[in-house]
Image: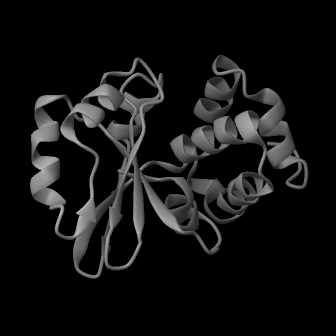
């Protein structure tokens, strides 16, 4: 499911971005299709052993695939160990873009990841994305779930920073 800045644009305000983030559930056996989906004649795709290491991490696995002709990049996050990943997969949103179905992570999950990235490295863009999502899609969000997850994940300071211009929720 699409996450990160592309998802925040879908739920919030437009901005420029250079890649797409994809949260996925894939086991080691499922990795065998990656070289077929992304052949080395057109893409940089890490070797299977690297993909297996990233999928096997207890948390925060990551790899990217780059289209050789355009330089476009997709960052893949095998997130099965995130406490809200299963919830996000069950609550993902289906959109049709250029007549193709695309699954997006729910906005609450996108916000949680943006809060984690902000906590780890700062970045006003994450806070802007969150503010935009709350302004545009806030009425459709489950703030009870979001506030609970923020507490469970220790993201209170980042959440407060993201909402300081929003007023109380």
Horizontal side of 107 relative to 138 (left or right) equals left
Examine the rendered structure and indicate whether residue 142 appears above or below residue 148: below
Q: Is residue 160 left or right of residue 114?
A: right
Snapshot colouring = one colour
Residue 134 appears anywhere in the view: yes
- Name the residue: 64% across, 45% down: 114
Viewer-nearest residue: 106 or 15: 15
17 or 113, which is in the foreground?
Answer: 17
Q: Name above or below for residue 4 compared with residue 161.
A: below
In the rendered image, residue 104, in percent from the top left (x then y), is placed at: 39, 55
Question: What is the count of numbered marks?
Answer: 0
Viewer-closest of 91 and 52: 52
- Residue located 62% across and 75% down the image: 16
Where residue 26 sits, quadrant-wise, is top left
Q: Is residue 142 visible to us here?
A: no
Percent of width and height locating residue 128: 76, 59
Q: Is residue 98 above or below residue 7?
A: below
Q: Quadrant of the C terminus?
A: top right
In this rendering, would 37 be left or right of 124? left
Q: Position of residue 64 (x, y in %)?
A: 38, 51
Residue lying at 22% horizontally and 32% vertically, measured from the top left: 49
Where's residue 146, x and y in %? 62, 34
**Residue in the image at 68% along x and 59% along y:** 129
């Amino acid at each position: 499911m699409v996450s990160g800045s592309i998802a925040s644009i879908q739920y919030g305000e437009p901005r420029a971005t250079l890649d797409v983030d994809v949260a996925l559930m894939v086991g080691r056996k499922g990795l065998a299709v990656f070289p077929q989906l992304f052949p080395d004649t057109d893409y940089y795709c890490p070797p299977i052993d690297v993909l297996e290491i990233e999928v096997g991490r207890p948390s925060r696995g990551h790899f990217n695939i780059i289209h050789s002709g355009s330089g476009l990049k997709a960052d893949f996050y095998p997130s099965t160990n995130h406490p809200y990943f299963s919830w996000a997969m069950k609550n993902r949103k289906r959109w049709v873009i250029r007549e193709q179905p695309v699954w997006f992570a729910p906005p609450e999950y996108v916000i949680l990841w943006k809060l984690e990235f902000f906590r780890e490295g700062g970045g006003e863009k994450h806070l802007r994305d969150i503010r935009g999502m709350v302004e545009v899609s806030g009425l459709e969000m489950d703030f009870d779930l979001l506030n609970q997850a923020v507490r469970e994940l220790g993201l209170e300071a980042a959440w407060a920073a993201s909402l300081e211009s929003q007023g109380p929720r």
